[in-house]
Amino acid sequence: MTSSDPTRLRLLRRIQRRYPTSESVFRFGSLELPFVRVADPDRVLDEVAAEEDRLERVSGVRASSDQLHLPYWAELWDSAIGMGQVLAKRWGVGGGEWGVRKTERPTSSSPPTPHSPLPTSALDLGCGMGLAGTVAAALGARVMFADLEAPALLFARLNSWPWRDRVRTRRVDWRADRLGEQFDIILGADILYERKQWDYLEPFWRAHLAAGGTVLLGEPGRQTGDLFVEWIAPRGWLLTRHSEKVSTRERPIRLFELQMRTD
């Protein structure tokens, strides 16, 4: 992506001083998004592991898994691509229908349909390099990118640059932080992989989802995803499942759509 904006170029150079990058173009219906990402995520992981080994040799203490910040953000997960496709379909770019739909609990109100009104505000939680939130911003939503890792937020800022007037970034630890605001839609691409995080995520969603809002989660088909369906059922949420085919994998991505029950 070429740009004469000097501020954007400074941001790109800041990123590239630390991380070699590559660029892809993603198409979601009629929406075309250039996207800058880490060129070699494995290299980032190796660097984190090497630094942890160095610190252990110095201190004699191995960091716990909670303290070790593994660079999950540096990988562009298939779930984010699937969520981008779904957002574009839902908000009328390129048309089309959602994938296979299965509502887990009957309700008197119908699930939202394609071409539903655009949510005013979106939270991309655990945003990584920001693909899903960038799609939401391109479609007109005000977006907060939230991630525990500061480098992820730099990429999210860069990738959403054309819509920077309606984008914010914030470092967030969903285990402890509260934002003091609510959102029409909360996006989470591949954030259900660790069971112990659900006990923090569920109250976080509850605190930050506006009335009538939606939590949309992308999940690639892990066993933890199956367990999540059972775990969330008694906690006051209406769960609707969708599937979305993406070109980067054979099996479709699963989309879990959560809304607070009102009955």
Image (cartoon, rainbow, N blue to C red):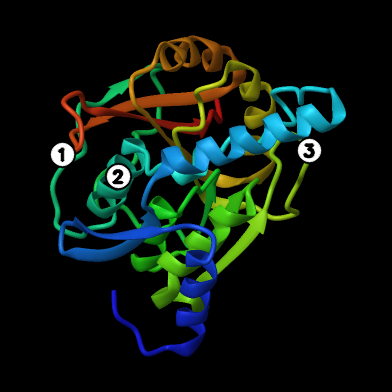
Q: What type is the residue that disc 3 sits on?
A: Ala
What is the secondary structure assignment of the residue under circle 2? helix
Residue 79 as seen in the image, left or right of residue 89: right
Three-letter residue code for mark 1: Ser
> Which residue in the protein does label 2 denote?
81
Q: Earlier in the sequence, mark 1 or mark 3?
A: 3
* Residue 3 picture location, percent across and down: 34, 84
Residue that carries the numbered disc 3 in the rendered image: 176
Residue 159: quadrant of the picture: bottom left
SS category of the residue bearing label 1: loop
Quadrant location of the C terminus in the rendered image: top right
Mark found first going from the N terminus, 3 or 2:
2
164 shown above or below 123: below
The foreground one among 164 and 3 is 3
Residue drawn at x 48%, y 57% is 19
Instruction: Tell me if mark 2 has few (under 14), some (14-19) or many (20+) residues whose alpha carbon lies within 10 angstroms of its own.
Output: many
Can residue 42 be seen from the camera position used here? yes
Question: Where does residue 166 sit, x and y in percent of width and height?
Answer: 51, 73
